[in-house]
Amino acid sequence: MARTPRMAQIEALLAEDPDDAFLRYGLAMEHASSGDDASCVSVLRDLIARTKENPYVPAFLQCGQALMRLDRANEAAEVLRQGIAAAGRAGDLHAQGEMQGLLASLE
């Protein structure tokens, strides 16, 4: 997929601060917006790994959705289960509920 000017801006900012979760999430959403779900998943998996100690909960939901669009339901279910647990630890009941609903649609 084509690299957008916004992606280039975000990547330049990430070069200065590679652990900025918000920027990394934004880059993933740019990939999703451009129709490149595979790159979106790759960036989100990296974000999830980088924020293991303090999870960036929206990354799990978006990763699960992108995996579903790629017809990778088993992987989506696993990411969603991880996200449900992370959201529970973070006390984010809204995100937890969204991921539970999405997971239920897969099972």
Image (spheres, rainbow, N blue to C red):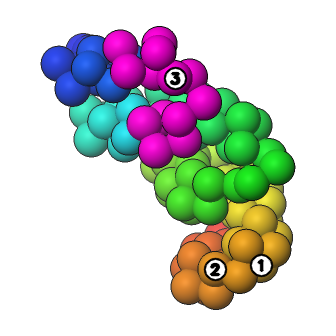
Image-quadrant location for residue 34: top left
Residue range (magenta): 12-24
Circle 2: is it few (<14), some (14-19), or many (20+) Cα within 10 Å? some
Left or right, 65 with reference to 49: left
Assess disc 1: are there few (<14), some (14-19) or many (≥20) residues with their C-alpha within 10 Å of its C-alpha: some
Q: In which quarter of the image is residue 86?
A: bottom right
Give the residue at mark 3: 17
x and y, in percent, of residue 61 in the image: 57, 61
Q: In this view, does 72 lie above or below 38?
A: below
Q: Name the residue under label 2.
A: 92
Secondary element at image label 1: helix
Give the residue at x 26% y 20%.
Answer: 9
Q: Where is residue 75 in the image (x, y as percent from the top left)?
A: 73, 48
Give left or right: position of 102 versus 32.
Answer: right
Position of the C terminus by quadrant:
bottom right
- Number of callouts: 3
Q: Which amino acid does label 1 sit on?
A: Gly
Q: In which quarter of the image is residue 2?
A: top left
Q: Distance from label 3 to label 2 (Cα)?
A: 26 Å
Q: How far apart are marks 1 and 3 (CA)?
A: 28 Å
> Residue furthest toward the front?
16
Q: Which residue lies furthest to the left in this view?
A: 5
Dot 3 or dot 2, earlier in sequence: 3
Give the spatial CA distance, label 2 vs label 1.
6 Å
- As drawn, the label of residue 88 is 1
Instruction: Pick whichever, 45 or 47, lies toward us.
Output: 47
Mark 3 falls on what kind of element?
loop
The three-letter code of the residue at mark 3 reads Asp
Does the image show residue 68?
A: no
Q: Is residue 72 magenta?
A: no
Number of the front mark, 1 or 3: 3
Q: x%, y% of residue 30? A: 31, 36
